[in-house]
Amino acid sequence: MRYLYKKALCFIYPSLYEGFGILIFESFTMGCPVLLSKRSSFPEIALDAALYFNPENLESIYNTVNRVINDSKLRIDLRNKGLNRVKDFSWKKCTEETKKFYKDCI
């Protein structure tokens, strides 16, 4: 998978509903530009590190993919934003926040 992420022009996630979206972070970690449905939690997770499209509109998907394919500066910008965004998340941080949540509940 690492090889595919690193060689891909972009990762496209045309989902109508997802939970957290681990694949988004896999893509970010590998420096792969990300294109996402503007649905569910995706905009909250990726912020400005991804481009968004309407997954129920083929023209929207086509236009977004076409932008990334034809604009190497945009791909570099998305790659850099993704690498920065993934720094906001870690298993250590998740563990610490979960531990704090349980302590606050007791």
Image (spheres, rainbow, N blue to C red):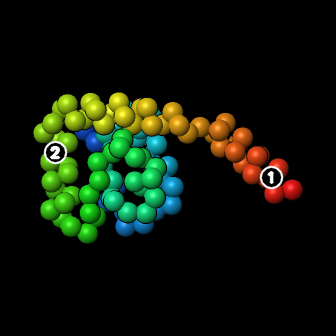
Position of the N terminus by quadrant: top left
Give the residue pinned by disc 2: 67
Disc number for residue 61: none
Q: Are marks 2 and 1 in contact (CB under 8 Å)?
A: no
Give the residue pinned by disc 1: 104
Count all numbered tags in the image, as a single digit. Answer: 2
**Along the line of sight, which residue is nearer the eye, 18 or 48?**
48
Residue at x-position 15% and y-position 62%: 59
**Along the line of sight, which residue is nearer the eye, 83 or 22?**
83
Q: Position of residue 57 (x, y in %)?
A: 21, 67
**Along the line of sight, which residue is nearer the eye, 103 or 10?**
103
Residue at x-position 24% and y-position 35%: 75
Q: Position of residue 13 (x, y in %)?
A: 34, 55
72 displayed left or right of 12: left
Closer to the N terminus: mark 2 or mark 1?
Answer: 2
Specify the amino acid type for callout 1. Asp
The quarter of the picture where residue 82 lies is top left
How far apart are labels 2 and 1 at the CA level?
46 Å
